[in-house]
Image: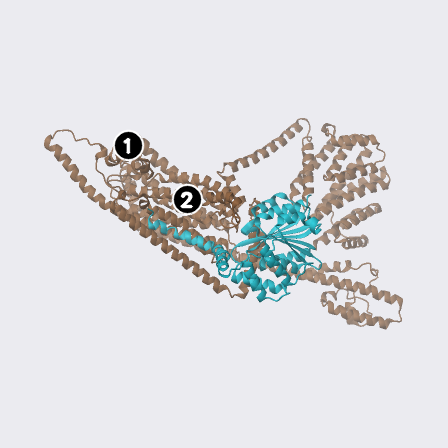
Chain colours: A brown, B cyan
């Protein structure tokens, strides 16, 4: 019990100070104690007891060190006491002091937070009070009353802590303590108080005081937040002290120094303001930050996490776009050969007629196909422009670089997220977690808050039910069955959609063989349509099915994500397989064309050669030159079309499914027979999982297709930009907050993991095509080479010195590469195992902490229980003694009866309090009756105690050591 | 011509809709199709059929058994939108907490809620029940008498609510309503509430309970509640009576008066 000890020590020092024998102060002090007691309420007896002990300790000289500060204080007090005696009657001084005691008690009352700090502060307060005493007493001695009066007022104000009532009281006290000051002077005081202090009139001593006061105010402002006061008081105090500081801060210092000081203060203020503005500015600079915050406040953090993810994706695409645009598209457009110069840069004669039609352009044919947007346009010229830009090399490196950069970013983000998430065990303190962490503090919309409230209550209900059910353990089979059933249904759905896509792709191949012109638009776009539709509707079905499973929404979201992932992946890979088939077809065609071209050229030259052998070579317009099918451009086109149709589907769904529905619900509600808003169609909810996956797969397609269509990152950037605004708008205008709003803290890394998987899966086919399939012979930057990566070799041979290529060839020797890979694997293994051991250590530490916590709790509980017991027992014993003594005094001859009662009491006593610690309290007690009884006989014969007067304090005193013993 | 593959792609959507709104389809079947069919077959109205069942399957004079019979008929045989057992429990609790002396019920229908309220009333309380439809009122009257409540406890008024409310003070000497239960036409919730306010029948602390706040729902009523600030209100969320998957709610309003 540190409080008790603290109190005693303080009181003891006080006694020592007053040991010279000043009864007056002692009285004051007692009164002060009295007041404090009344205020503090909870331990009045204790204090009284301490006083008692103090008095008794007067005679017993304790050996104690006196610190410098205490001596100072003592001297100061002595001085002021002397002044007080000299100046007026003790009565007035008393009054003043009483006032101060009041201040002190009020102050100490406020500080309920920490008992220890309270005591310390009390001491500080005491010091401050002394200071103010000094200030108060001085004016009487000094001649220039008025001036110092103002300083005094300052002190008063400082004491008054901004509460007006108190101030008024102060004034009253002031007048009472100085009756000789006339009414006029009082008025003057007021004027002084209200008006500005003229610092040049203040003596250096006062200035010092003023400075101290200002410093104290500043300290108060800083520590205000931690104080356990009501908010209103805090605000008032804050305002008052700020005003005070503002008013008198500038007054400090002298002459030039003062100006400098004021200037410094002003500059710090300005600097702070600038910092704050800069913070605001920084927030404003983060793109869409305010929009996302607004959405977060309306829909909770799970929806906001989608938008944050979208923004992050936008950033990545920005960089991809920068790479492809700056290093591939712009150089080719500026420095490469212009359009129409060579066959691959010209629209063929057959297509020329409709090359500018919108339908053709929309399909990325015609002029769009023969432009920088696609692979086929690029020339295989090794260096272009006046500064010899290595175009094919650049093309290849950008293709590799984008993928490498994406890997790097995704993995880095994942690592960062993993650090943030930490090891959380949600299972062990289920209800505590729910109790203290389920509120989403970012919600700012009453309706969402309502939903959140409802969802928390339902989650509580569910958790309670779960807890009950886990004990009953009978429904688990049903749940399991339902989960299995749900998964089965989902699998069926996946298989069905896979088969449908397969069927459609086969059909489209048939159409392609027949020639696309013979079929309708529907049939031509069947694959894209079916894929988009399935991608749109199947998640809905999954969502409905997942209601069977009865998972927590966060878990359900992850399942949902996984299922949609599987669906999209299946769709994508079916698409890729179809593309592969198409590539093979094109390559067969290419072989035929290649043969034809040689025939054609031969015939051309033969035809001219026969007529005139010296004639210049025939100039043929590049549009007329026959050319190969260029499968790379075809792949690029397919991806671009897919992206476009995907984007269109998303937007159209948004407009029809969300906006139109919202409009209908909103405006038909007036004339409908049920409540459309609350009931059947209702507004749509924002589908986080579907949108996230759409985004991820979209990105995967970009990664896959960017090599063959450099325009893809640009298109994607456009799409993301538009969808940011469109979706923000759609969410705010036509969606309602989810019924079960939940936090999305855990799912961010889940998105990232999926992105990584998709990145891997999408680079796989791209790398496969690059490595295995030879590039087309007459289009693209790698035409004429056997493989695309031959570019590197070529560059090494021709652009670098010979030794470099030698080094490179050594380095790429399998004998070097294999050990290196082995080393890397070993390093990864080592790192992984260390991280695992760290994690284990973490968990162990956590467990240890928990155990310790529980132990402490138990110990505390025991101690509290014991203390209570002791208390009760002591009370009882005191009662008994009182009774017994009375009985003793009343009739000595009835001793036997008395003893009977006594016995009874003690029996009761025995039953109630079996604690042995009580017994050995006062073993030297005078024997009266049988010895074993006496052991338990409380404070009966103690001459110091009067009956009924002191019931609680004694056991309290003893409780402390008894506690510490255990 | 849309190809069959594209049409097949819409199958998941269809399935989704069917599964998601299955309770509504079931409700439609039970409340509309079965009703029409039975009306044609038996020639009786739905309420009369319910009354017949209750008459044969309950103990006269025992409100509990009558309510049970109603619940059974409505959940197993046909559908009548009574307040139902679950929301009824909320109503019972509110009545017990409030223990009102004058109660107004708007929309008696076939007397289920009337019996339910009358059962929970304290001694000496009086319930005024308003029903617009003659046939329904006749059946409600029979049910009420069957449950053993006499004229002093329950008074059935056969008239539209917007005609009765203005005359309550003059014709029935009502000064203040302690409790109002609304379960009639959802469109009339708001006008009737405003009528009650207008004629000063609500005092500070009067409680109004309105059923079917979410399905079929009374959006205007809710909007008015949010706006006017005369009431302290909340919505007890529950399911629609005799059906599992359709959410519904009861609004509990306490009149605070103009501050």
Tell me the quarter of the picture where residue A102 sits.
top right
Asked whether the viewer can see residue A890, the reply is yes
Residue at mark 2: A650
- The residue drawn where x is 43% and y is 39% is A722
Q: Position of residue B178 (x, y in %)?
A: 68, 52
Instruction: Rate crowding at label 1 as few (under 14), some (14 to 19) or many (20 or more) other CA atoms within 10 Å.
Output: some
Q: Mark yes or no: residue A827 visible.
A: no
Discs 1/2, front: 2
Q: Residues within 10 Å of mark 2 (few under 14, many from 20)?
A: some
Residue positioned 35% across, 36% down in the render:
A327
Quadrant of res B60: bottom right
- Residue assigned mark 1: A339
Q: Which mark is residue B165?
A: none
Chain label for disc 2: A
Question: Is residue A186 shown above or below A124?
Answer: above
- Image check: A306 left or right of A623? right
Disc 2 is placed on an element classified as helix
Residue in front for this viewpoint, A553 or A793: A553
In what element is the residue under mark 1?
loop
Decide if residue A917 is on the left or right side of residue A730.
Answer: right
How far apart are the two marked residues, 1 and 2, measured between alpha carbons?
35 Å
Quarter of the image where the N terminus of chain A is located: bottom right
Chain at numbered mark 1:
A
């Amino acid at each position: 019990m540190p409080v008790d000890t603290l109190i005693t020590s303080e009181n003891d020092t006080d006694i020592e100070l007053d040991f010279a024998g000043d009864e007056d102060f002692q009285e004051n002090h007692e009164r002060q104690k009295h007041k404090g007691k009344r205020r503090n309420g909870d331990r009045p007896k204790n204090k009284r007891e301490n006083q008692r002990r103090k008095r008794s300790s007067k005679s017993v000289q304790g050996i104690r060190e006196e610190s410098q500060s205490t001596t100072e204080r003592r001297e100061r007090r002595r001085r002021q006491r002397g002044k007080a005696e000299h100046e007026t009657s003790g009565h007035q001084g008393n009054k003043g002091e009483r006032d101060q005691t009041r201040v002190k008690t009020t102050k100490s009352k406020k500080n309920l937070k920490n008992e220890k700090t309270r005591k310390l502060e009390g001491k500080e307060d005491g010091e401050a009070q002394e200071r103010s005493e000094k200030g108060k007493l001085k004016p009487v001695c000094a001649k220039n009353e008025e001036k110092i009066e103002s300083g005094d007022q300052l002190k008063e104000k400082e004491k008054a802590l901004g509460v007006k009532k108190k101030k008024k009281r102060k004034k009253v006290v002031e007048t009472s303590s100085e009756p000789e000051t006339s009414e006029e002077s009082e008025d003057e005081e007021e004027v002084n108080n209200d008006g500005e202090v003229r610092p040049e009139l203040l003596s250096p001593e006062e200035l010092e005081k003023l400075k101290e006061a200002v410093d104290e105010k500043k300290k108060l402002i800083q520590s205000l937040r931690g104080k356990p006061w009501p908010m209103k008081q805090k605000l008032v105090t804050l305002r008052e002290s700020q005003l005070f500081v503002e008013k008198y801060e500038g007054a400090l210092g002298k002459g030039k120094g003062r100006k400098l000081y004021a200037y410094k203060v002003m500059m710090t203020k300005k600097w702070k303001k600038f910092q704050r503005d800069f913070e605001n500015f920084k927030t404003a600079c983060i793109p869409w930050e305010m929009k996302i915050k607004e959405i977060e406040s309306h829909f909770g953090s799970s929806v906001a996490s989608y938008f944050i993810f979208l923004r992050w994706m936008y950033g990545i695409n920005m960089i991809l776009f920068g790479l492809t645009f700056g290093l591939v598209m712009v150089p080719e457009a500026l420095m490469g050969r212009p359009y129409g110069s060579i066959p691959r840069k010209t629209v063929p004669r057959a297509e020329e007629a409709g090359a500018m039609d919108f339908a053709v352009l929309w399909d990325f044919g015609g002029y769009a196909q023969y432009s920088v947007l696609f692979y086929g346009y690029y020339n295989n010229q090794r260096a272009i422009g006046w500064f010899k830009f290595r175009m094919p090399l650049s093309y290849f490196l950008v293709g590799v670089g984008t993928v490498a950069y994406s890997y790097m970013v995704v993995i880095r983000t994942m690592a960062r997220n993993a650090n943030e998430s930490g090891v959380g065990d949600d299972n062990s303190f289920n209800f505590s977690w729910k109790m203290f962490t389920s509120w989403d503090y970012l919600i700012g919309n009453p309706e969402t808050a309502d939903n959140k409230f409802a969802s928390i209550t339902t989650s509580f209900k569910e958790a309670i039910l779960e807890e009950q059910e886990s004990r009953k353990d009978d429904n688990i089979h049903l749940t399991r069955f339902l989960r299995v059933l749900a998964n089965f249904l989902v699998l069926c759905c996946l298989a069905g959609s896979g088969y449908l896509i397969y069927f459609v792709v086969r059909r489209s191949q048939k159409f392609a063989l027949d020639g696309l012109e013979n079929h309708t638009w529907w049939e031509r776009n069947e694959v894209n349509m079916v894929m988009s539709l399935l991608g749109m509707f199947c998640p809905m079905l999954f969502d409905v099915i997942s209601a069977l499973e009865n998972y927590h929404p966060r878990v359900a979201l992850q399942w949902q994500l996984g299922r949609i992932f599987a669906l999209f992946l299946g769709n994508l890979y079916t698409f890729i397989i179809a593309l592969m088939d198409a590539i093979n077809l094109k390559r067969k065609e290419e072989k035929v064309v290649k043969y034809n071209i040689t025939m054609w050229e031969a015939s051309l030259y033969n035809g001219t050669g026969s007529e005139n052998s010296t004639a210049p070579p025939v100039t043929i317009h590049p549009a007329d030159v026959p050319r190969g099918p260029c499968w790379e451009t075809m792949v690029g086109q397919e991806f671009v079309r897919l992206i476009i149709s995907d984007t269109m589907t998303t937007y159209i769904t948004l407009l029809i499914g969300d906006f139109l529905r919202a409009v209908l619900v909103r405006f038909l509600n007036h004339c409908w027979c049920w409540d459309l808003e609350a009931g059947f169609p209702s507004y749509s909810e924002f589908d986080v999982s579907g949108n996230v996956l759409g985004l991820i797969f979209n990105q995967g397609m970009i990664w896959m297709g960017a090599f063959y269509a450099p325009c893809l990152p640009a298109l994607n950037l456009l799409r993301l930009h538009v969808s940011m605004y469109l979706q923000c708008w759609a969410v705010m205008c036509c969606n309602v907050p989810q019924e079960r709003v939940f936090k999305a803290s855990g799912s961010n890394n889940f998105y990232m993991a999926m992105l990584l998987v998709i990145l891997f899966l999408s680079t796989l086919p791209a790398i496969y095509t690059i490595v295995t399939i030879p590039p087309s012979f007459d289009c693209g930057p790698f035409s004429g080479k056997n493989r695309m990566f031959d570019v590197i070799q070529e560059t090494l041979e021709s652009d670098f010195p010979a030794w470099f290529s030698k080094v490179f060839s050594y380095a790429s020797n399998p004998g070097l590469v294999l050990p290196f890979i082995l080393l890397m694997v070993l390093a990864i293994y080592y790192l992984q195992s260390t991280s695992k051991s760290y994690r284990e250590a973490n968990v162990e530490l956590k467990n240890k902490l928990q155990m310790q916590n529980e132990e402490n709790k138990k110990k505390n509980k025991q101690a509290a229980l014991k203390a209570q017991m002791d208390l009760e027992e002591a009370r009882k014993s005191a009662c008994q003694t009182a009774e017994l003594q009375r009985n003793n005094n009343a009739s000595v001859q009835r001793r036997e009866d008395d003893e009977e009662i006594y016995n009874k009491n003690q029996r009761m006593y025995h039953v109630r309090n079996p604690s042995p610690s009580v017994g050995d309290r006062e073993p030297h007690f005078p024997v009266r009756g049988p010895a074993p009884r006496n052991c338990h006989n409380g404070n009966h014969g103690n001459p110091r105690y009067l009956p009924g007067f002191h019931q609680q304090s004694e056991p309290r005193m003893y409780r402390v050591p008894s506690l510490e013993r255990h | 011509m849309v190809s069959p593959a594209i049409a097949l792609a819409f199958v998941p959507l269809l399935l989704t809709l069917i599964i998601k709104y299955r309770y509504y389809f079931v409700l439609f079947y039970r409340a509309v199709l079965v009703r029409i069919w039975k009306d044609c077959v038996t020639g009786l109205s739905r309420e009369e059929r319910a009354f017949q069942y209750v008459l044969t399957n309950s103990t006269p004079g025992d409100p509990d058994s009558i309510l049970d019979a109603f619940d059974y008929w409505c959940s197993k045989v046909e559908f009548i939108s009574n307040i139902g057992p679950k929301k009824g429990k909320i109503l019972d609790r509110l009545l017990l907490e409030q223990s009102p002396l004058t109660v107004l019920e708007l929309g008696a229908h076939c007397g289920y809620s009337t019996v339910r309220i009358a059962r929970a009333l304290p001694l000496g309380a009086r319930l005024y029940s308003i029903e617009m439809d003659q046939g329904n009122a006749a059946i409600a009257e029979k049910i009420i008498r069957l449950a053993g409540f006499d004229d002093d406890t329950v008074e059935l008024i056969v008239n539209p609510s917007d005609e009765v409310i203005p005359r309550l003070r003059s014709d029935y000497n009502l000064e203040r309503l302690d409790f109002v239960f609304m379960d009639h036409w959802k469109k009339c919730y708001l006008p009737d509430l405003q009528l009650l306010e207008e004629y000063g029948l609500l005092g500070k602390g009067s409680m109004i309970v309105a059923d079917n706040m979410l399905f079929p729902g009374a959006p205007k009523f809710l909007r008015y509640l949010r706006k006017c600030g005369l009431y302290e209100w909340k919505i007890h969320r529950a399911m629609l009576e005799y059906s599992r998957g359709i959410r519904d709610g009861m609004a509990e309003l306490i009149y605070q008066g103009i501050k």
